[in-house]
Amino acid sequence: MIDLTSALGPSFDAGKAPADALAVNAAIVKRLETWDNWAYPPAVIRQMRREGRGAFPAPIPSPRARTITMDGPHGPIDLRIIAPDSPRGIYVHIHGGGWVLGSVDQQDQWLERFADRAGMACVSIDYRLAPEHPYPQGPDDCEAAALWIAGEAKRLFGTDRMVIGGESAGAHLAAVTLLRLRDRHGVMPFRAANLHAGCYDLALTPSVRRWGAEKLVLNTRDIEMFVRHFLVQGGDVRHPDISPLHADLKGLPPALFTVGSLDPLLDDTLFMAPRWAAAGNRAALEVYGGGCHVFIGFPGSNTDRCLERIETFMGEACAD
């Protein structure tokens, strides 16, 4: 069941958006006035983003993080772990970046928070990126890693209570991974899914198509280019393995969907959450007024409220 009235509320009234969110948005737009993700090869843009050039602040790697490596279908897969001494559950995390950018160590600030406040052992998957490793290699890595973690959970962390999730392309890959585990392996080891600002329809939803050129983190052209790079070797954008919005969603775990009202990918969440619920799964939908794409990557009141909500959600999912 999903309560759309309470989920949406006044979130689409710009006059009621938090002032700090609007200030962050204005700063992002100004900063990206001359920024072009596509002016350099992806490898160069990845390094520039690591240096804090682009929409997001430079990442601060956690000194607590450690890496283990597993065998995958396309070669070794690194798993970055930030965990408390006695975790109550495991958060299998998939980072965003349009399947092209981003890295496994750029979300440490909130994975540390989930470890400390929600007691989660956070395991982030270093999946292969397009266009060097296009579809299906990234989803293949996530599928293999999820299965491996499920099999090793008790040995590694003393618990098999697991949540899967991610942001943007990571939320997409988390949904695809759940569908693959259900359909290819007949298993569902996850108690819940945390899906933030996901892209669930690579045919592009109306909010993506109508957004235009304004670069509030990303714009229509960026999303089109990300899809092009991900599918450089081809693929049907309406196939459920590519666009999970088109899938049969029955038999999936409870999910928390969060998104900002000023996200080009807003419709992806607004369409996916009710479909998740209509398939008989529990779904919670929360829209944060004035929030940009992956607003939890920036400081502010929306970020604090959203991260607290995610912590509560994961804690409840992993309770006895």
Image (cartoon, helix red, strand yellow):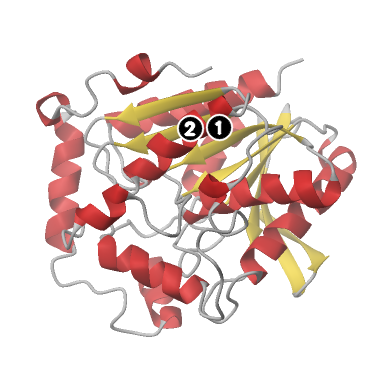
Give amino acid for label 2.
Ala
Q: Which residue is mark 2?
A: 273
Residue 40, percent from left and from top = 33, 84
User: Would you say 126 lies left or right of 267 here?
Assistant: right
Tags 2 and 1 in contact by the CB under 8 Å rule? yes
120 or 93, which is in the foreground? 93
Q: Amino acid at mark 1?
A: Trp
On residue 311, which mark appears? none
Q: Which residue is mark 1?
A: 276
Position of the C terminus, as image quadrant, is: top right
Q: Answer yes or no: is residue 137 visible.
A: yes
- At horizontal 50% and vertical 65% (from top left) the residue drawn is 99
Residue neighbourhood size for the residue with mark 2, other residues' Cα within 10 Å, grouped as few (<14), some (14–19), many (≥20): many
Disc 2/disc 1 C-alpha distance (Å): 5 Å
Name the spot of residue 32 as percent of width and height, x first.
Answer: 19, 64
Residue under the image location 20 percent in, 60 percent down: 215
Secondary structure under tag 1 reads: helix
Q: Examine the rendering and report whether any part of residue 127 can be seen.
A: no
Residue at (68% x, 57% y) in the render: 142
Residue 105: x %, y % from top left: 54, 58
Q: Residues within 10 Å of mark 1 (few under 14, many from 20)?
A: many
* Count of numbered badges drawn on the protein: 2
The image shows residue 51, relative to residue 274, as above or below, that is below
